[in-house]
Amino acid sequence: MLIDMSTNRPGAPTRQTAPPRRRHDDAPDTTTLFTRLAALDDGPERDAIRDELVNAWLPMAHRIAGRFRDRGESIEDLRQVAALGLVKAIDRFEPERGAFESYAVPTITGEVKRHFRDRMWALRVPRRVQELRNKVRVARRELTQSPGSAEPSAADIAAHTGLTEDEVTAGMEALESFSTLSLDAELSAGDDGYSLADTLGSSDASYDVVVDRESAKEGLRRLPERERAILYMRFFEDMTQSRIADQLGISQMHVSRLISRSCARVRDEALGRRTNLRGPGGRAV
């Protein structure tokens, strides 16, 4: 008795075959050229084959560059960066290790991403913050894939990524950090409009006065009583040297010498003490 083993009979499961891997139109067959390139030493012939490979694969590099359009960089600059990645891929490719496209795509993509990471920030952002930015960006996209999904909060992103809310906040701030805002930018559209520069503080000279006073205290305390009295009358009561001399019964020249000597002594002690108070870098401690 013949038994029908066909899988096409009603109710029988059908085996699904995987669709063939799609090959892009900009992925030419250059196996022969790569084999010749690997066998040649540096010279005109090798340079000519290398240029031919670059021209053949340049459309693929441009396609990859197009994935990153509308991110604040012109498409012409992105294509140049992708072309640089293509040249690196051609120079490093080993034909015996597989298809060139499988090696070139991540190489070119990595070069473009590196361009954004290192060149597109108006201010230098630490690598750690850049990585937080990427994690937050991917998490926001994943959490809003479903239609009608609300914008995820920092707590939602933290739970999704395993980051802390502070790290998520830092990553969200970095999402908008490719460009800077001018200090002259208007922050209010009303009649009382003000710029960003108006909201910034400035250095307070009083801090230096405090440091100077604290530095001079010890030196003033070490002066003899008569010299302290002379300095007080001269600089706090605004008395002339003649009046001070008459009050103390000494000559004006003597008063002048005492003032100069006392000030020099206090100054020398204050300069050494002020250096200690400011600490490294000249900042007050």
Image: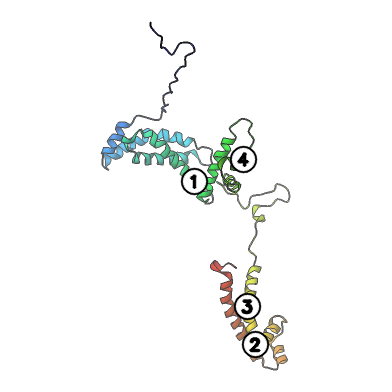
Distance between the alpha carbons at the discs numbered 2 and 1? 65 Å
Q: Amino acid at mark 2?
A: Pro
Does residue 109 appear to the left or right of 206 in the view shown?
Answer: left
Looking at marks 1 and 4 on the same chain, the residue that comes earlier in the sequence is marked by 1
Distance between the alpha carbons at the discs numbered 1 and 4? 26 Å
Give whichever of 209, 274 is nearer the camera.
274
Q: Secondary structure at mark 4?
A: helix
| Residue 262, quarter of the rendered image | bottom right
- Residue 131 at what x, y percent from top left? 52, 46
Distance between the alpha carbons at the discs numbered 3 and 2? 15 Å
Give the position of the N terminus as an image quadrant: top left
Mark 2, other Cα within 10 Å: few <14 / some 14–19 / many ≥20 = few
Looking at marks 4 and 3 on the same chain, the residue that comes earlier in the sequence is marked by 4
Distance between the alpha carbons at the discs numbered 3 and 1? 51 Å
Pointer 2 and pointer 1: residues touching (CB < 8 Å)?
no
Looking at marks 4 and 2 on the same chain, the residue that comes earlier in the sequence is marked by 4
Please name the residue that numbered disc 1 is placed on: 117
Please name the residue that numbered disc 2 is placed on: 224
* Residue drawn at the location 63% of the way across and 63% of the way down: 203
Q: Amino acid at mark 1?
A: Arg
Give whichever of 25, 251 is nearer the camera.
25
Give whichever of 158, 189 is nearer the camera.
158
The label nearer to you, 4 versus 2, is: 4
Q: Secondary structure at mark 1?
A: helix
| Residue 107, quarter of the rendered image | top left
Q: Amino acid at mark 3?
A: Ala
Residue 277's place in the image compared with 36, above or below, is below
Give whichever of 111, 70 is nearer the camera.
111
